[in-house]
Image (tube, grey):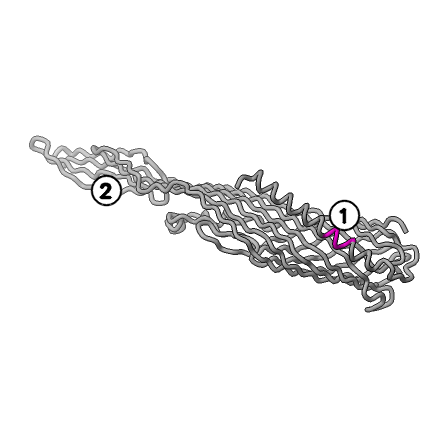
Amino acid sequence: MSEFLEARIAHKGLRWSMMTGASVAVLLAACGADAASDHGDRPTVWIELGVNLNRVDGGNERFAPDFVTQIDTHAFSSPVALQRPPRYANGFEGKLTVQPEESDWSVSVGLRYGRSNGAKQAHQQTLPASPVLIESIPALSFYASPQLPPLAQRFASTTASNRSSQLIADFQAGRDVGLGLFSRNSSSTVNLGVRFAQFTSRSSSRISADPDFGVSYKYASTAFHYFTGYFKVPVQKWHVYSAKAQAIRSFHGIGPSAEWDTSVPLVGDPNDGGFTFDWGVNGAVLFGRQKAATKHSTKATYDHHGIGTASISSTVYNHPSVPVNRSRSVVVPNIGGFAGFSLEFPNARVSLGYRADFFFGAMDGGINTRETYDRNFYGPFAKISIGLGG
């Protein structure tokens, strides 16, 4: 499936999830609009903007053609290690929350986006000694040992790149189920709604190597009239390997979600400026589609060169690229949570914290066959919230 078509499908899924979430949120808010309580002149609209830095775990299968083991045994670093995806992704987040006056109900739309890019390149090589041709005619006291240029050298060259992105959108309706549940002025909110998640990754790698260049010697003798000549003839042999691989992987899913958020005052009064301890847990079940499109090729040649003989170059094997496309409907459980601290004012809030989200079996990270990998995100975040209205 083309990237354009995939983008259209993802766009339709996101649009549908937004409409569904908004409809559920409005309905729940309408049902609880008459649940009045004394909230004073609190803001009715909160706008949150923030940034985050996530450690990304999960990865995918790394491309390791057969000849990689020969590279490892000849004192070169493995090309497989360079294919590791970036460990961290940075991103931004935003959230809009509306809580009508005289109501414990609220509706919200939240968005988190992150991306990572990484490229690595390594070239390792040796400096082989020059082969020596030895010629000797003892009867004439002749001896010569000219050096010959090496026709190859051991080397390993690898280039790898990885790109990934993640988008998480939440559409929720919630209610404060316990003002003062943990302490005076604390709040505890239960949210129900819809979560949409989209993960994509692209990777490519190129490997070329000559891990076994070497020189062996053959001995020969030849009669020149009444004299005998002795020769030590170098024979140069080596293999050249090359391989390349590409992979595009994605997951799109949507499903019901639930969240419980709590805020407990620690120091001061939020009406004058105070610190709070915030924590929450969340869960969702996402129904979606998992896709993987991969292709790779490998080639090996053998070269043999000796003095007085024709050079031999032959193809050992040549496996051309064969595209593999997989698509599968999956159910992905998601759990997560956060903890942090906030400096609160009547119409503003500054928050710092740490968040984790785990999506189990979200990605097909295999190359030739399907292999599922989790996609986990955890790391610090910082955000500022502004209250309007009230």
User: What are the residue bounds of the magenta stretch?
Assistant: 21-26
239 or 236, nearer to the observer? 239
Q: Pointer 1: what residue?
A: 49
Instruction: Report the label total.
Output: 2
- Quarter of the image for residue 106 reads bottom right
x and y percent of residue 68 in the render? 40, 48
24 drawn magenta = yes
- Quarter of the image for residue 321 reads top left
Q: CA distance from mark 2 to mark 1?
A: 72 Å
Per the image, label 1 sits on a secondary structure element best described as: strand
126 or 54, nearer to the observer? 54
373 drawn magenta = no
x and y percent of residue 143 in the render? 20, 35
Tell me what residue is drawn at x 68 percent, y 54 percent: 195
Asked whether the viewer can see residue 197, the reply is yes
Tell me what residue is drawn at x 27 percent, y 38 percent: 304
Residue mark closest to the camera, 2 vs 1: 1
Numbered label attached to residue 217: 2
